[in-house]
Structure formats: structure tokens, C-alpha cells
């Protein structure tokens, strides 16, 4: 086994050097340029639109509250501070999950 490793290691090392230093680098750059040309440089054309969609709802103080409030359900908007609605739901879910199933025998 050691002699097989001693024979194959220089061959594999040489192939690895050529692949990682020359072939794969040029292939990666070539394929990237080809896709960029085929898609007419979509990464540049749509950069502004992507930034607007990503950061449109942010303000200097964090997330703009007006935008977030529009997405909330109606019951959530009307909920008062200190309400126990959420805790009751959690309690019911926990009770339901800990109930034992009837014996199926």
C-alpha cells in the first residue's frame, strides 16, 4: 500500500497543481463572462432594483414602522400593550402537545 501511495502521490499532485492553478481558474472566469454576456450583465443592470427592494423599508433608526404595520393582521394592530393574547395561545399549544394519546390496543 505504501508503494502504491508513493507512486500515485506525485502524479495526483501534478494534476492537482495544473487544475487548481490554471485550468479551473480560466474555466471559472470564462464561464462567468459567458453567463454575463448571455444574460446581458443582469448583475449590473438590476443592481439598483435589487438594492431598492432589499433596503426600501429601512430607515436610519432601523425598520420603518409604517411599512411593518401594514403587513400585520388586523387583530395584531388592535392589540394593546400588556395583552395576554399571545400567552394564552402558547399555553393552549403546550397543553395540547402534552396531552397523552388514547391507548390503541
Image (cartoon, rainbow, N blue to C red):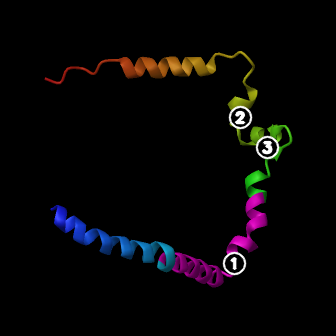
Q: In the image, is 58 to the left or to the right of 19?
A: right
At 47% from the left edge and 72% from the top edge, which residue is drawn? 20
Residue depicted at 69% across the width and 74% down the height: 42
Residue in the foreground of this view, choosing between 2 and 62: 2
- Report the Cα–Cα distance between label 2 and label 3: 14 Å
Disc 2 element: helix
Looking at the picture, tell me which residue is in the foreground, 100 or 44: 44
Above or below 63: residue 100:
above
Which marked residue is nearer to the observer: mark 1 or mark 2?
A: 1
Which percent across, then down, holds residue 47? Answer: 75, 66
Residue 48 to residue 93: above or below: below
* Cα–Cα span, label 1 and label 2: 43 Å
Q: What element carries label 1?
A: loop
Where does the N terminus fall, quadrant-wise? Answer: bottom left
Vertically, is 66 above or below 103? below
Quadrant of res 99: top left
- Tell me the quarter of the picture where residue 74 sits: top right
Q: Determine the CA span between mark 1 and mark 3.
A: 32 Å
| Picture coordinates of residue 11, whole percent (x, y) | 31, 75
Residue placed under numbered mark 2 in the picture: 74
> What numbered label is drawn on residue 41?
1
Prevalent SS, magenta region: helix
Residue 51 location (% of width, % of height): 76, 59
Helix, strand or loop at mark 3: helix
Q: Mark 3 points at which residue?
A: 67
Image: magenta residue range: 24-51
Quarter of the image that includes the C terminus: top left
Amino acid at each position: 500500500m505504501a508503494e502504491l501511495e508513493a507512486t500515485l502521490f506525485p502524479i495526483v499532485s501534478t494534476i492537482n497543481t495544473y487544475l487548481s492553478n490554471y485550468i479551473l481558474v480560466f474555466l471559472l472566469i470564462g464561464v462567468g463572462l459567458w453567463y454575463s454576456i448571455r444574460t446581458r450583465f443582469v448583475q449590473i443592470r438590476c443592481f439598483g432594483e435589487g438594492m431598492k427592494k432589499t433596503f426600501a423599508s429601512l430607515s436610519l433608526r432601523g425598520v420603518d414602522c409604517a411599512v411593518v404595520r401594514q403587513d400585520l393582521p388586523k387583530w395584531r394592530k388592535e392589540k394593546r400593550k400588556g395583552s395576554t393574547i399571545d400567552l394564552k395561545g402558547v399555553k393552549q399549544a403546550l397543553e395540547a402537545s402534552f396531552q397523552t394519546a388514547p391507548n390503541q390496543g
